[in-house]
Image (tube, grey):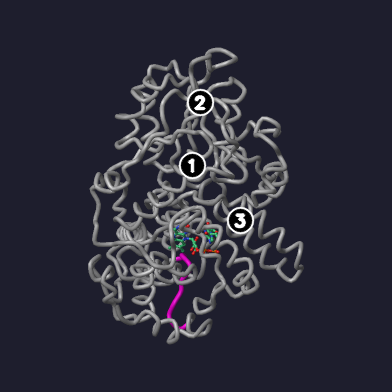
Amino acid sequence: INQSRKNWGSPMMFPYRMERVRPIIPATSPQPISPGQCVLYWMSRDTRVQDNWAFIHAQRMALQARVPLLACFCLVPKYLGAPLRHFQFLLGGLVEVQKECSQLNIPFHMLIGFAKDVLPQFLKDKNVGLLVNDFSPLKGPMSWMNEAKERMDGTVAWDQVDAHNIVPCWTASDKEEYGARTLRSKIHKVKDRYLTPFPAIVKHPYSMIEEMPQIDWVACEASLEVDRSIGAVDWAKAGTSHSLVTLHSFITKRLPNYGKRNDPNVPALSQLSPWFHYGQISVARAILETEQAAKDKPSLRAGFDTFFEEAVIRRELSDNFCFYNSNYDNIDGAKPWAKQTLLAHMKDKRPILYTFKELEECRTADDLWNAAQMQMNREGKCHGFMRMYWAKKILEWTENPQQALEFSIKLNDKYSLDGRDPNGYVGCMWSICGTHDQGWAEREVFGKIRYMNYNGCKRKFDVAGFVSKYSKY
Ligand code: FAD
């Protein structure tokens, strides 16, 4: 991987696709950075150094202006009910980022607090001429940005880069797409323009006068106001280095089975979603490597094509939905047909009602559902097929669709390492509100929303085998 990057020389030599960049505060002059200033990359969604178009843009601009380059992360005390498990994964990844930055002569700062409280002063202290940040379509990160912008005096130019998607979200489509079918053709049309090798972030030749900052990681963790009872999981270690190990084991061991990915007893999935979520690995890197593997070994081609569909089309569809639909996490975000059918069946008698606590503690009468929830609690990730069954049952067992959505999002965000992600909101909306799906035969409670049941799972895979793995704590 390193060699494939080095072939490009410095990011200055690389033809950068400027559509990846959108100005948040446009520069008032053609050269926004004057001598004595620097460029700052505010890292948030994409917590990696290499294979990161936001970092590459920041370094290009700094090299062009012959000024130092800095990076920072704003650590908020809490976020959407995420417990210590998720923050440890984030911080573990940032430890690697800091080390790599200091080797590359790029001071990396941890700013403790919300951007609005820490960033404006930091920009002044460091005499920043250009701020670069990465893109997220979610309301939380958008509000961190907007609040920080309000407190800035408008003299610092600010560029935002979509470093998460292969095709920049705003370029792929200018509206909420109807489904995978409509986005697929748009992405395939321009894919070769954006799925290119990455230039490396190189050792930065212009230095700050300051020393490389030391970070007190213990103090960072202590600053959090989170549930500390849900801790790290064994199988997923934080950081880009571990993401690359997981990518390698996917290509060599699980990709050949990817066609069987709907059987939760078969190790077929990439398992990359926690690292994708935190941006510790770029999806484009995973695609470039799996594509190369499929070129070298044609038997992997079918697996690669399906992986592309999931990791690019489905995932970028989730970003599209959250970017263009501000009701991405509630029933008002559903299409009219889905809202109508759910409303028509709102009063239908549910077979049984469970409280949030009963669900969280895996105490339903359905052993398969309990096993899925237990997998999420214990491993910080539930199998993709089981997630659909899991959310659909919540629709059946709660007072109304809005409550089903609230419970499923809250459980997913709390226990899943990859939660609090556009994919999570869209996954719950797909299961409960038919988002990106079609109407099916009408039935009690579900209306025309696609139905799944226990017997259907029994026909597809060894239910008892799956349950036995997650029957006890
Ligand atoms: P792989 O099959 O190896 O997929 C590779 C990547 O493709 C994933 O990491 C993901 O980025 C993307 N992908 C796969 N399936 C989907 C999908 N259906 N929609 C969008 N992108 C997809 N995914 C999350 O990343 N975070 C979540 O919080 C999340 N919550 C979900 C909740 C529900 C109710 C449902 C039905 C789905 C949810 N998904 C979520 C989507 C999907 O189940 C996971 O992406 C997948 O299980 C992650 O495991 P993996 O990386 O091993 O999957």
Cα distance in 3D space between marks 3 and 1: 24 Å
Q: Which numbered disc, 3 or 1, marks the residue closer to the eye?
A: 3
Number of marks in the rendered image: 3
- The yes-or-no answer for disc 3 within 8 Å of ligand 1 is yes
Q: Amino acid under label 1?
A: Phe
Q: Amino acid under label 3?
A: Ala
Q: Which residue is mark 2?
A: 207
Q: Secondary structure at mark 1?
A: helix
Local packing at callout 2 (Cα closer than 10 Å; few below 14, some 14-19, many 20+) is some
Q: Which mark is residue 153?
A: none
Q: Which quadrant of the structure image shows residue 360?
A: bottom left
- Identify whether 33 is placed above or below 293: above
Q: Which mark is residue 286?
A: 3
Image spot of residue 392 (x, y percent): 41, 68
Image spot of residue 191 (x, y percent): 69, 47
Q: Which quadrant of the structure image shows residue 42?
A: top left
Q: Which quadrant of the structure image shows residue 83?
A: bottom left
User: In which quadrant will I find the C terminus?
Assistant: bottom left
Front position in the image: 188 or 443: 188
Local packing at callout 1 (Cα closer than 10 Å; few below 14, some 14-19, many 20+) is many
Image spot of residue 355 (x, y percent): 23, 67
- Identify whether 15 is placed above or below 253: above
Q: Which mark is residue 323?
A: 1
Q: Mark 1 or mark 3, which is nearer the start of the sequence? A: 3
Please check the rendered image and state whether residue 450 is part of the magenta-colored stretch, yes or no: yes
**Residue 219 located left or right of residue 270:** left
Cα distance in 3D space between marks 2 and 3: 33 Å
Magenta residues span: 448-455
Q: Amino acid under label 2?
A: Ser
Q: Which numbered disc, 1 or 2, marks the residue closer to the eye?
A: 2
Q: Secondary structure at mark 3?
A: helix
Q: Mark 3 or mark 2, which is nearer the start of the sequence? A: 2
